[in-house]
Amino acid sequence: MARKKRPRSPEPPSPGVSREAWGRVHPELDLHGMTGEEARTRTERWLRDQQARNVRTVMVVTGRGLHSRGIPVVRNEVEDLLTALKGRLVSKWEAASQGGSFRVELRRPPPPERRPPRAFESAVLNDANPALRLRAAEALAELGVSPTPALLDAEIRRLLAEGADEG
């Protein structure tokens, strides 16, 4: 009896998604062939990138170390890194069923840092004659507008363009 061929999966939805990664449930980082230090550095950078993209669950593939010359180090390095990042970047992690990868739950990214708005700076406003500043503030008040520095600056510029005398 002839075997049926499996239908080929459709192309990935966007450029940059490899055929190998297409169809996986979670993003995956494969560390095969790296040294312990390379794997540690690459993993931390990749986890931070995934967190910034609001990805919550990822897979980190280390391999089981069966083909390593000497003691397998990648798995231990990644396990130490995940332990160190727990609570800050990683909310929890566990070894996958076959032992060659980790399923990692990432924390939500921190909210963007709120910076106080910069104070409005204007040479026109700073150098304006006090009488002209008062005239601009009164013009805004007549319109029922609260005179913020930016609006005062715009009104002083308008008055100057009309030929208002600074004296």
Image (tube, rainbow, N blue to C red):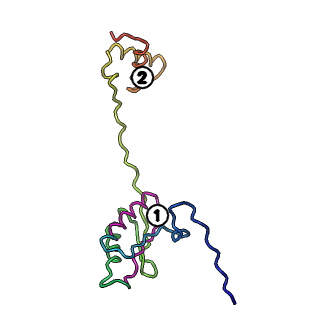
Report which quarter residue 61 is drawn in: bottom left
Report which quarter residue 1 is drawn in: bottom right
Q: Which is closer to the viewer, label 1 or label 2?
A: 2
Q: Nearer the viewer, residue 161 or 106?
A: 161
Q: Earlier in the sequence, mark 1 or mark 2?
A: 1
> Residue 76 at x, y = what percent?
32, 77
Q: Residue furthest right?
A: 1
Q: Which residue is mark 2?
A: 154
Disc 1 is placed on an element classified as: loop
Disc 2 is placed on an element classified as: helix
Q: Is residue 36 above or below residue 159?
A: below
Q: Quadrant of the C terminus?
A: top left
| Count of marks placed on residues | 2
The amino acid on which the numbered mark 1 sits, given as a three-letter code, is Arg
Is 71 covered by the magenta stretch?
no
Q: Are marks 1 and 2 in contact (CB under 8 Å)?
A: no
Magenta stretch bounds:
39-65
Number of the label disc, if any, that sits on residue 56: 1
